[in-house]
């Protein structure tokens, strides 16, 4: 495969484009975001085998019509390998494929996001030819498995969200994406489509969820509504939420007295998870206090 190139048009419409002009503060972020989308998509599908670039070629009067070129170029390392297998060349996603995977009306990434509108599919059917059918209720959307991969890529989706911010600008009502030589209508995005293009709320990834019997020494107790006390297990100090309602009731009624060094024999639920930003965290909750052992008040001689 040689270096490849493909063109597509981005058309901005609305009062802000009157006279064929547009404020650079409206145009620049959208074009930069498009560059980020294609860069992230190329890295997702081609890895380090090829690099991509998006460049502006020309503008035309009217609304505001920008002609952009996408390049996908083999990496220098691959160009220097005389024995680089033909199958590897064929496996590289070309520029026109990237454009289709992102902006195609019938099955590209943006069309898929408009179909989903933040909803999770009820079912995904994979076909032998590499296409997938996404089903929500009675509605079906057929696309390429690589488009689905792009929809699950955080860098790609971040670029899409940044691009959608152009529609939030006052005076811009619509952004259309079209391929110059195709007769099919362009993919149109309006202000109503902004929520569909935003990143969905990301869920925490649960790594460990377990219940353990532990002996914990009370470091400090709290009577705040969150019932978070501070404990030591002999090596580490941490906070834990008390969920044992019977124990909390006894504390509230002054049926239990506490002193420095008291320990609890209890069942502890440990929940370890990774946040959407990749940070590892742990939460501990005491679900049952089996015994409250008061610290020694005097020396034991016998």
Image (cartoon, rainbow, N blue to C red):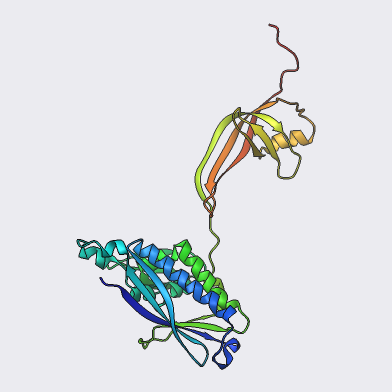
Q: Is residue 152 above or below residue 109?
A: above
Front residue of 98/267: it is 98
For the question of whether residue 102 can be seen, the reply is: no
Question: Which residue is found at the position 62% from the left and 37% from the top?
Answer: 287
Is 118 situated left or right of 264 in this image? left
For the question of whether residue 165 can be seen, the reply is: yes
Q: Is residue 18 above or below residue 206?
A: below
Question: Which residue is found at the position 40% from the left and 81% from the top?
Answer: 8
Q: Is residue 224 above or below residue 3?
A: above
Where residue 126 sits: x, y (%)?
A: 33, 64
Circle count: 0
Where residue 213 sits: x, y (%)?
A: 57, 30
Front residue of 32/301: it is 32
Is 73 situated left or right of 277 in this image? left
Is 39 situated left or right of 63 in this image? left
Where residue 193 sits: x, y (%)?
A: 54, 76
Where residue 55 sits: x, y (%)?
A: 43, 77
Question: Which residue is found at the position 35% from the left and 61% from the top?
Answer: 48
Front residue of 109/206: it is 109
Front residue of 205/21: it is 21
Q: Quadrant of the C terminus?
A: top right
Question: Which residue is found at the position 44% from the left and 75% from the top?
Answer: 111
Q: Residue furthest top?
A: 302
Q: Quadrant of the N terminus?
A: bottom left
Quarter occupied by residue 138: bottom left
Q: Is residue 272 above or below residue 90?
A: above
């Amino acid at each position: 495969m040689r270096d490849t190139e493909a063109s597509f048009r981005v058309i901005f419409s609305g009062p802000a484009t009157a006279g064929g002009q547009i404020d650079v503060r409206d145009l620049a972020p959208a074009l930069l975001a498009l560059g980020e989308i294609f860069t992230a998509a190329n890295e997702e599908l081609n890895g380090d085998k090829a690099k991509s670039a998006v460049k502006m070629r020309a503008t035309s009067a009217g609304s505001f019509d920008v002609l952009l070129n996408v390049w996908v170029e083999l990496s220098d390392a691959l160009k220097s390998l005389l024995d680089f297998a033909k199958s590897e060349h064929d496996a590289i996603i070309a520029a026109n494929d990237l454009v289709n995977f992102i902006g195609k009306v019938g099955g590209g990434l943006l069309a898929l996001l408009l179909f989903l509108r933040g909803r999770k599919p009820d079912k995904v059917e994979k076909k032998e030819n590499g296409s997938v059918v996404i089903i929500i209720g009675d509605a079906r959307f057929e696309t390429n498995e690589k488009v689905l991969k792009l929809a699950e890529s955080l860098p790609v989706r971040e670029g899409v969200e940044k691009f959608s911010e152009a529609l939030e600008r006052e005076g811009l009502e619509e952004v259309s994406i079209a391929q110059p030589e195709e007769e099919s209508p362009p993919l149109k995005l309006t202000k109503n489509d902004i929520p569909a293009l935003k990143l969905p709320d990301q869920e925490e990834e649960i790594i460990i969820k377990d219940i353990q019997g532990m002996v914990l020494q009370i470091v400090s107790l709290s009577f705040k509504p969150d019932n978070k006390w501070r404990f030591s297990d002999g090596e580490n100090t941490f906070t834990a939420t008390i969920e044992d309602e019977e124990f909390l009731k006894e504390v509230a009624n002054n049926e239990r007295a506490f002193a420095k060094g008291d320990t609890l024999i209890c069942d502890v639920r440990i929940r370890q998870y990774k946040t959407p930003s990749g940070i590892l965290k742990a939460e501990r909750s005491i679900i049952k206090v089996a015994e409250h052992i008061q610290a020694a008040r005097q020396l034991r001689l016998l």
